[in-house]
Image (cartoon, rainbow, N blue to C red):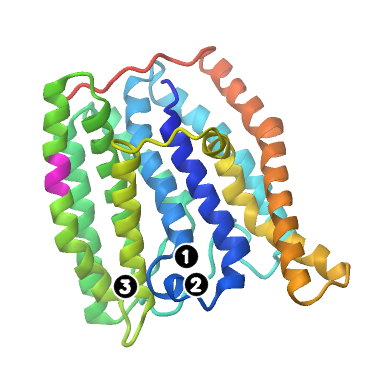
Amino acid sequence: MERLTHIDALRGSAAILLIFQTLLVPLLAGSWVLRHVVDPGLVAQLWFLLACGFVVPASLHVSVDAERGFIIRRLLRLLPVYLLAVLLTAIVLPTSPAWLPGVAPATAGVAFETIGAYGALPPVLLFYALCLMLRLLGLLHSVSLRAGCALVLLAAALLLALVQQLIGTALPVTLPLVLSLMFFASLWYEAQLESSSYARRRAREYARYTLRLYLLVMPVIFLAGWSAGATVGPRDLLSYALATVTLLLFTSRLPLRTPLLVWLGSLSYSLYLLLPAMHRLSELLTHSLGLTGSTASLAGTVLGLVLALGSALLCRHLLEQPLAHAGKRLTGQHELLPLVRLHSR
């Protein structure tokens, strides 16, 4: 399947937000916008997940080597870099959950977990499993079934939120919610890139209907998780809305094509996993130099950026690309497949 540059650019935009969240937000902790309106790190993680939902069902559907090749290529793409990030995180951040590199610290004010509690990788793996199951059943091509999956997962998130409100025990509310949004992104792919005009119109109808239900249900889900006097809950709801709306715009009327964003998108997976460890390493190096005050903050930010980009670039060239080529050789794919559109039935 041919790469979509505007999706790579969306991942690059997510990488910029992650850099901003990790390196600059601590310096802007008093900002009213960051405390009450939007969480850049959450928007970035949602962009990663929505981009995955946008392309993975299409690439799996047109794959010529079925499920085995998909699993081999994805494991070689994800696992080695993840294990490297786990090792580095365990070394420089021993007090953090080292087995979840890229995970943000828990935020007070929301009763249920958010993506930051477990990172973006578990939802991605669950989404892969669901798509593989639909492929095995011969149902992945069906736009109506994927719309149904999105709505069933949305209903599961709503049910978990309401049950949690009744029993007062934290439940994984946002996990089915983000999976639902990923299936919605797969509908949006078809609404934009399907070769048949009839299929595009049909997919857009399903997408519009699903969006209306999101508008009705998502506020209820987040309301159930807000604690008294919390300000983080509304911010998370606005962040979800912003991520979804910008996905619609950046994949239709305002496609991103900036070369810098496309380049950052190629580094985004390694950057996402390595950024927390590199930020901590920059703090340790800055402290060892005896810098204090604003000078230390500025030096730590610049050094963290250099270390994060440098490590992601090395990881890309020394791990990701060689293993991607190895995966293609193992599965008999020596060249990129032509872009074949999904056809609805």
Viewer-proximal residue among 138 and 201: 201
Q: Residue at x 40, y 52 (%)?
A: 46
Q: Position of residue 161 (x, y in %)?
A: 25, 70
Q: Is residue 74 magenta?
A: no
Task: Find residue 117 and name its label.
Answer: 1
Circle 1 Cα neighbour tier, 10 Å, few/some/many (<14 / 14–19 / ≥20): some
Left or right: 162 in relation to 65: left
User: Does 210 appear above or below 115?
Assistant: above
Can residue 201 be seen here? yes
Q: Report the Cα–Cα distance between label 3 and label 1.
A: 18 Å
Q: Earlier in the sequence, mark 3 or mark 1?
A: 1
Q: Report the Cα–Cα distance between label 3 and label 2.
A: 16 Å
Q: Residue at x 29, y 29 (%)?
A: 135
Instruction: Inspect the image, locate mark 1, and give the three-letter code of the amino acid beneath it.
Output: Ala
The quarter of the picture where residue 98 lies is bottom right
Instruction: Inspect the image, locate mark 2, and give the three-letter code of the amino acid beneath it.
Output: Ala
Instruction: Tell me how many marks there are.
Output: 3
Residues under numbered marks 1 and 2 in contact, where contact means CB atoms less than 8 Å apart? yes
- Magenta range is 206-210
Task: Find residue 234 and name its label.
Answer: 3
Instruction: Inspect the image, locate mark 3, and give the three-letter code of the amino acid beneath it.
Output: Pro
Query: SS at mark 1?
Result: helix
